[in-house]
Structure formats: C-alpha cells, structure tokens
Image (spheres, helix red, strand yellow):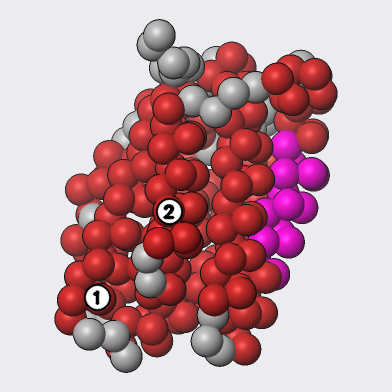
Amino acid sequence: MSFCDTIWQDVAPLRRAILEHPFLAELADGTLEGESFRHYIVQDSLYLAEYARVLALAAARAPSAAGRLEFSDGAKVAVQVEEALHQAFFAQFGVTPEMAHAAEATPACLGYTSYLSALAATRSYEELIAGILPCFWVYWEVGCDIKPRATAPNPYAAWIDTYAAPSFGEATDRVRALVDETAANATPATREAMATAFRNATRYEWMFWDSAYRREAWPV
C-alpha cells in the first residue's frame, strides 16, 4: 500500500471519533447551536490565515513545479475561502468585523497553527506536507459523510457543500499524490516522521471541532 493508504488506515480510530463528534452530528441535522458554530467560524478564520502562510512556505520549499503550483494555489484558495465563506457566515451569525478582529486564537487553534508553523520552520519538507494533508483529507471525508444525511433546509448547507464539492476532493487527491510521491523517495526514518506529523495534525482536527463545541477559551 502507499504511504497515504497506510496512514489513513492507521488513524481510523481518530477518523471515527471525528465523524461521530456531536459538533458534526448536530451540524448535519441542523441543530448545532449558533453560538458553537460562531465560535468555530471565527477560530477557523484565524486558522486559515495561518494555514495559508504554511501552504505558501510549502510552495517555496517544494522541489517540483507540481508542488510549487499546488501549494501556492492552495494558499490562494485558503484566503478566498476566508473571504467568501467566512464573510457570509459572519453576516448570517452576527459576527461583526470588530468581533472578528478582536478574536484571540483558542488553545486548540493556536496549538494547531503553531504546530504546522513549526513543521514549516524546523522540520523537513516531507514532514511539512504530511502535516498539511489532514486539513484537506479529513474535511473531504467529513463533507462526503455529512452531505447525504444532512437535513434540508440546513443553516449550515453552504459549509457542507464547500467540503463535499468535487473540486475539493480533486484538490485533496492532488495533495495526497504529492505526499505519496515524496514518501516513496524518503528513508524509513523520514516516512515515520511523516506519519507522526499526519497523526498529530489529525488529532488537532478533532480538538478543533471539540473546542468549538465546548466554546473553549483560555482557562486562566
């Protein structure tokens, strides 16, 4: 099996925990409290701003033209999603520009973005793109899982449609192909480090939704 197929099976318990999380279950049936989604969308806006920077760093470090194009395009799309989807939800859920500007990253958000930034700054390109992949792949799986069972009308339909869109799946496939190609040429030690980065980022994905569901703030 390829690297990605192997690590995807390895994190199956994490993936199940994500798909079964009440945040996503309630989002699918339209009963998620608006305050929890408002918490999520503000934090996701902060996350995507940093994720776009990480993708741009991956593009700069990519050894191939395909990698440079894919990650630079990904950085652009992350900014576009922030501007379009988030702004629409900000208006829908009563988030003013002042509220968004004053928002502080929660422990989960800061931990996730700091981890990816640390990969970009101090670890190998191979580890970096392995850590980047779960944000694509997990969201694609979530979108595909929720879409068929989502109630209609649903206040979160635009979010569901974004991550279940074929174009998002195609982007996920392209990043996965880059990770597999890189892993195939890596040493066993590097592949193990890549697996660790992928696993940790997947854990942060669960933590991000859980923190939004609980409306987590700094404890002190």
- From the viewer's side, name the closer residue of 147 and 93: 93
- Residue for point 47% across, 60% down: 121
- Does 82 appear in magenta? yes
Q: Main secondary structure of the magenta part?
A: helix
Asked whether the viewer can see residue 170, the reply is no
Few, some or many C-alpha atoms within 10 Å of disc 1 (few <14, some 14-19, many ≥20)? some
Find residue 17 and report its horizontal and vertical position in percent. Answer: 27, 39
Task: Please check the rendered image and state whether residue 90 is part of the magenta-colored stretch, yes or no.
Answer: no
Give the answer, above or below, for where 21 lies relative to 199: above
Highlighted range, magenta: 73-86
Residue 43 drawn above or below residue 143: above
- The residue positioned 40% from the left and 86% from the top of the image is 181
Element class at badge 2: helix
Relative image position of residue 211 (x, y in whole percent): 42, 25
**Badge 2: few (under 14), some or many (20 or more) residues near its Cα, within 10 Å?**
few
User: Which image quarter: residue 194?
Assistant: bottom left
Q: Which mark is residue 118?
A: 2
Task: Report how far apart the C-alphas of labels 1 and 2 lie in the structure.
Answer: 18 Å
Tell me the element at label 1: helix
Residue 22, numbered label: none
